[in-house]
Image (tube, helix red, strand yellow):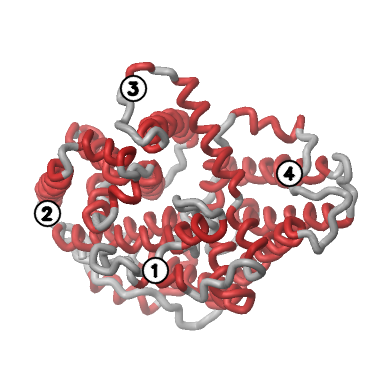
Amino acid sequence: MLDTAVYREKAISFKNSAIQSTKEILIEIPLSVRLIMILYFFLYELLVPIKSLASPGGLEPEYIVFVILHIIVAFLILAPVMIRFEGIGLLHPFVWPAIFRIAKGYKDLGEFFTPFFMDQRLYEVSSHFSYANDIIDANFRNLTLQVISLACLYLAYYLTGLRRKQKFFKFSPKPVPDNIVTRIIIWSGIAAAMSMAFFISQGGIKAWMNSWGIAGRAEAEEGKGPILSFISSLYYIPVIWFIVKGKEVFRNPMFYILMGLFTLASFAATGSRYGVLQSVTVFLMAFIYMRKEVPIIKMLAGAVGFFILFGILGMLRTSATSNKSDVDWALLSKGDISGYFQYAADEGAKRAAENPDIAILQKVPKSVDYLYGQSFLNILTTFVPRAIWSDKPHSGSYYTGQLIFGVEWGIPPTEIGEVYWNFGYIGFILMFLLKGYFFRVLVNTFKHYHEAPAVMIIYFIFLFAGTGLDSLSLSDFLRKMLFIFIGFKVLKLL
């Protein structure tokens, strides 16, 4: 049972108790994970770049600079994982996103053997190029901005930690109600009914998914943002159930039904596999936190299963969107596991090849003007339906597709490209200093309220979806948080 008075008492000695309890609250990084990350760094982020120097033209001054910057960026990203720092654990915004990004990047088993066969360059540089060349300049600036962003992030985070009185967000969590399971099941029924009402209004789930191909996903979802965000956020309900009841939920069939139903509902609503991945990952974080262990074998097995699901869902969606037709449901009966793997790998390679940050740095401000914060206004207006304000600002993904690549669909940039495009160099530095400060306050908040199920969920979702300074992710995070807060009120957790 939670007692808000306990939180007020903890605030008196917050700084010391938070540091002392980091191993339990943020979960000590297992030695095996540290060793894997160290091995990864030396094989993939050190050996590969150094070996690439032996490629034709690899000893050109420009390319050597790129290799050095690449290694520095990789080291700065992985340092909190490889090296033991006070106050840093597995569930820390410096650690979890870094590990997750690496794991998500390997969609082809052949990539694991890259260090032993790699004989190509990391960057496009040929002997007749000079620093005046667009692609060299863009690559150099991209790597330099990554170094600056990490330096600002760490500097602000650790300087903020030196303050005598630590800042944290104030919450008023309530004791877990005795009838919490009943509330969860009732709220799940209401949420499921609301979701089905939406699908029925669109002619059924099949008809709704078919509309992605006939009208296009963007057009089909136009004006339906609030209900789609509501449906895609419902995975938090079974996760809350697990947090408040622990492993006993695994003996209840209803838990598995809700977990599967609300996880797949996210894809059925938006066509985004990202929501499915978010559901699985948030549950994994909750599992690690509650059990105080990292189930590496189970995680690897789950990753293989998810990768197959990733390919299946992608093929279903593409069968409609690429052909401008109905979803080809016959794909499910083929059972071509190797085909699902290949599709996921090919799509991952296609997305990686787009490299929107480099394209932005090539064109801004030479041929495309700065956005001056326009894409970040999308975050502030995220709760205003486009049906009411049709010309409200779009996310960075929309502008990158339209203005940089000249296509009708969105291509999401990373925070590096989007922050630079909006605010230039000075604004870039200020934004990442602010990010470091925010990370410190957020970690302090989690340490302070770590016993509150609602705060756990908010923190875990943030680790997955809110750590980047890109408007698309942050807007999605805020929209889901609105409906999740409503759910917490219904469940009497806030």
Residue 105 x %, y %: 56, 41
For disc 2, the marked residue is 178
Q: How many marks?
A: 4
Discs 4/3, front: 3
Instruction: Find the distance from the CA under tag 1 to the CA under tag 2.
Output: 45 Å
* 232 is higher (above) or lower (below) than 347: below
* 269 is higher (above) or lower (below) than 380: above
Q: Is residue 176 left or right of residue 272?
A: left
Instruction: Find the distance from the CA under tag 2 to the CA under tag 4.
Output: 51 Å
For disc 3, the marked residue is 332
Residue 472 x %, y %: 42, 59
Secondary structure state at the residue bearing disc 3: helix
Discs 3/1, front: 1
Secondary structure state at the residue bearing disc 1: loop
Label pair 2/3, CB-CB below 8 angstroms? no
The amino acid type of the residue labelled 3 equals: Leu
**10 Å neighbourhood of mark 3: few (<14), some, or many (≥20)?**
few
Q: Which quadrant would the N terminus be assigned to in this image? A: bottom left
Residue 21 x %, y %: 45, 62
For disc 4, the marked residue is 42
Instruction: Find the distance from the CA under tag 3 to the CA under tag 1.
Output: 38 Å
- Disc ID at residue 325: none
Instruction: Find the distance from the CA under tag 2 to the CA under tag 3.
Output: 43 Å
Secondary structure state at the residue bearing disc 4: helix
Label pair 1/2, CB-CB below 8 angstroms? no
Secondary structure state at the residue bearing disc 2: loop
